[in-house]
Amino acid sequence: MTSFVDRVTLYATAGDGGNGCASVRREKFKPLAGPDGGNGGRGGDITLVVDPSVTTLLPFHHRPHHKAAHGRPGQGSNRHGADGDNVVLSVPDGTVVTSAAGELLADLTGPGASYVVARGGRGGLGNAALASPRRRAPGFALLGEPGEQRDVILELKSVADVALVGYPSAGKSSLVAALSEAKPKIADYPFTTLVPNLGVVTAGDVIFTVADVPGLIPGASEGRGLGLEFLRHVERCSVIVHVIDCASLESQREPLADLDVIEAELAAYGGLQDRPRLVALNKVDLPDGRLVADMVRPQLEERGIPAFEVSAVTHEGLRPLTFAMAERVRAHREATAIVVAPRIIISPKAVDDSGFEVLREVDPSTGEPFFRVLGSRPERWVRQTDFANDEAVGYLGDRLARLGVEETLLKSGAAPGSTVVIGPGDDAVVFDWEPTIAAGDAATRGPRGTDRRLDEA
């Protein structure tokens, strides 16, 4: 049964905003006392938050789909709808959030770090909020905006100070158990460790974490064995410690060759060249292990790599190794603890930025030209419009005209009756464009958004 998962796909759907309410206040002897429709509530967000007690992405493996609550619709008497409840998802420290296309969205490290994966839609305005001195009696309200739907990839990269790397059965898990209170699974066959094991180590006044990286064999960076699945857990470490089996029963194995193979895999994975290296010559409690360690240690020192003869069974040599790791962890922390004043980058809009664009396109099926309007505001206004209400459609036309969309359409060659599409792809709204849009019975109601009966009452 799966107990450790470090890469999952999360399907997040935020809540939709509630619709605004179109309502008229009624009082004694005054049946039309003015609009009193409330606004709709905001849809709930879906947020990732780092929780130190969570160590795996397993919950998302079993339940990848998450939805937030919708906002409630507004009501009469100026009652606003309730906001939808937010969904807070706990993730391990070191979780990286990327889009399906591989774009980095967030790198969550440190307790409490958070990222909003999907934002809830804004609630629609009620007719009370839409009223103005020129539009005293709106007979419509705005619809709530749909919440965001996003598919993101969550990838766990363990936040460990020291990474133990080496061939299977080199004794990495045994060293973690000997250095800390961790109790990983230990056996005398390869690939015993199927998940990274983390342990907390204390050396003087330095407290740091150690993780073993299982499954590294030749070709690991290309997907062989289990190494590719766990190489990501080396990325955040401060120190890399090669654990070499000096008493291997495999005749074709040779300590320096093992180190070179693992280094080649780390180099192929990339991004680890600047990490300091140490070597733990393990299993010196065995006669053959001691002999091999004495032969290999001078050669490693010639390469400039500090080597330590250790035994995870008898704990021989562990204290010098522990303090050597602590010294390098401390140096790394001091080097990265420099506080850099944040820079605030202000990017004002261009003076000629209208907030939208009009593109002339051709329908491939019919060969007929049409005009596509793209822009955050026009697209949002379309989503907020109740097309079953003529006055709401007229209000949309007024907004588009004030923004300059009609003028730009005319300059682009559009004529009355031309096909105009607002929005991208399949979510677009298609209509036959008329430069002036009537809403309601103008003869009886007067200018759009007014009602003569209010004056008569």
Image (tube, rainbow, N blue to C red):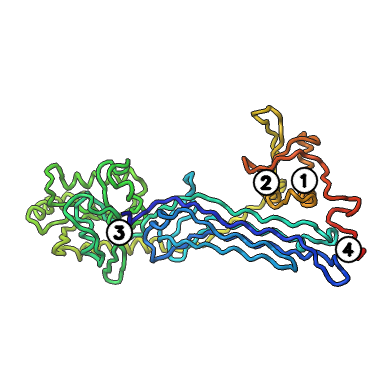
Q: Position of residue 194 (x, y in %)?
A: 27, 53
Residue neighbourhood size for the residue with mark 3, other residues' Cα within 10 Å, grouped as few (<14), some (14–19), many (≥20): many
User: What type is the residue that disc 3 sits on?
Assistant: Val
Residue at image mark 3: 162
Q: Nearer the viewer, residue 165 or 267?
A: 165
Q: Nearer the viewer, mark 1 or mark 3?
A: 1
Residue neighbourhood size for the residue with mark 2, other residues' Cα within 10 Å, grouped as few (<14), some (14–19), many (≥20): some
CA–CA distance between discs 1 and 3?
Answer: 60 Å
Secondary element at image label 1: loop
Q: Quadrant of residue 158?
A: bottom left
Secondary element at image label 3: strand
**What residue is shown at x 64% (from left), y 58% (from top)?**
17
Residue at image mark 4: 454
Mark earlier in primary sequence (2, 4): 2
**What residue is shown at x 16% (from left), y 58% (from top)?**
309
Mark earlier in primary sequence (1, 2): 2
> Outermost residue, left direction?
287
Residue at image mark 2: 375
